Amino acid sequence: MTDYHWPQSHRRCLRWLIACLVVLTIFSGSQFVPLASADELRSNSFVIQFGNFNMTSGEKSSSSYNLTDTVGQTANGPYGQYGSSDYFIGAGFQYIYQIDEFSFSLSRTAIDLGTLTPGVHNTASHTMSISTRGAGGYTVYAYELHPLRHSGGSYTIPDTTCDAGTCSESTAQVWSNQSVPGFGFNMAGQDIPADFVNTTYFRQFANQAGAETMQVVMSANTIASNRSATVNYKAGVSGSQAAGNYQTGIVFVAVPMY
Amino acid sequence: MPKKTKLFTTILSVYLACGTLLSLFCLWGMTPAVQAQTAGFAISVSPPVSYLAVKPGETVVWRIKLKNESLAPVTLTPQLLDLKIPDDGRGVAIGDASTFPYQPSLKLPATVVIEPGDTTQLSLEVTVPATAPSQEYHQTVVFTAAPTLDSTQPASQAEIGGAIASNLILSVIGNPPPQSQLQLQTAQVPKIMDSFRPLQFHLVAKNTGNQVGLASGSAKLINWRGTVTKTWEFFPDRVLAGSPRILRTFDLNTPRDASDSTLTALDKFEYQPHFWIGPYRLEVWLSPNGLTPPELVMQTVVWALPLSTSVIIITFGLIYAGYQRFLALRRKPNFPIGK
């Protein structure tokens, strides 16, 4: 049997391939080294380096829970024992979640209700999303500037009172009869009030022009990670409603817990 | 080509191919994630709540960061309002105006304009006069992007505006220094329970002092033999001065992601045995200020009785007695219904 001897060019090529392979392997392996991430905590005036003396602290866990705590630390509480002139002692790991970001978003800033025709309900919707790491949670309120108002300013579409005439800005009822005019909304998704039983339950918005108190449309008393809900708007007119375009403004206010 | 060379070439090719795929995968992982941005309203505020303390005659700075995470510039109108706590101690509400006496020193800007992706920081100074007493103030600044009504639109529309708030809890440390004083305001505990049903109750604490205090303590259920059957540790919520707050306990049952080390809380205290009977003593221990050891603030007895079983037994007993009475009456000669 004759041994096969590779030509010089092939041997050079092979060496080049092996070199590339070694480089790729080293490069790939480096991506699996976990990055060291330093947690830095900032308050309004300074950086907290978790500086307190305590008996025990940190993360503890069992098969059924994980816990962060600080036990027996000096100067616990929001202000330490009596507080100080211009800084906040965040003694206790739990407080870092109060200092984190609070985020709120709306998917749209305009809802097109189209041309309103008697006997037909027009609908449109958008979503809203909220995140907070505070253990107290959040609340989202909603109100309207005024009822849907004609562009000429003289006529309005009244806020809905639903099929039975019993819904309000604080209580949702069924509104499915298309011959019942009005303007209202339904909520679907996470952390919504319990009176939105299903997609046929509607409320009217709290009317700021009428000095009505804005109402809760989303709330939770715990941390929230991208909690979202859909707001479904509905409008309908009666046969005697003046023709034209109607407008209003709706405001959603997100308030974190303390 | 010799077999050994063929084998070597095959192994090398496979190794090279795997390495290339792996590297491509890692490169893909290294690509910075495109942060999702919405065409609507998307604002984040930090911190959501600031606890600041100031001495009379001094100034403290309240810093708030706002980030515009949407695709369009946003114009926010800040407004300082009172932060209110509902009487049931649940949640938070906003007042119609602010009663903060040191508001003029804040100098809120008329508007705040933030470009897409940008962050802006506000530094609001609160100056307290030298004669200010020890007191705590609860305020919130609401940043509103008001809806823009456009009457030229060709169809009926609802313009949507968003608003986000950042809260301020300010303590004026005067002389004498402020103190928190937590008391148990409400305890909705039933007196009698069915032996087959769980015990559920709520506790509301009120801070009658003039500085925020931490809810610290526990509730204990002790059976007739003196054994502590159940202990609920209070979640360290803050109870603001002059305000109530519903007490919560740690939720150890809700499954969470293993990477999430935060514990959530429940505002319902619950004891769920399969069966319990007899008198149980419920003790509530609460620290007056979150610093000193908890004190016994409430003690009550809950009776667990087999009510549902008793009702069933009594009902059947009555039915049986009624049936026996009916049979006895039937034996009488003048009974109207035939035998």
Image (cartoon, rainbow, N blue to C red):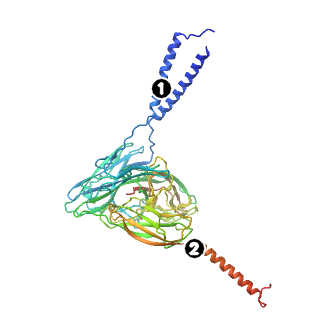
Label 1 SS: helix
Residue linked to disc 1: A24
Direction right: furthest residue: B339
Please say whether residue B143 is visible from this viewpoint.
no
List x then y, in percent, for residue A249: 43, 56
Direction front: furthest residue: B225
Split into 4 quadrants, where in the image is the N terminus of chain B?
top right
Label 2 SS: helix
Residue linked to disc 2: B307
Split into 4 quadrants, where in the image is the C terminus of chain B?
bottom right
List x then y, in percent, for residue B247: 41, 63
List x then y, in percent, for residue B331: 77, 87
Please say whether residue B311 is visible from this viewpoint.
yes
Would you place residue B202 above or below residue A136 in this image? below
Looking at the rendering, which quadrant does residue B327 occupy?
bottom right
Q: CA distance from mark 1 to mark 2?
A: 74 Å
Write down the chain letter for disc 1: A
List x then y, in percent, for residue B119: 35, 44
Would you place residue B153 above or below residue B297 in this image? above
**Mark 2 crowd level (few <14, some 14–19, many ≥20, 10 Å Cα):** some
User: Which dot, 1 or 2, sits closer to the camera?
Assistant: 2
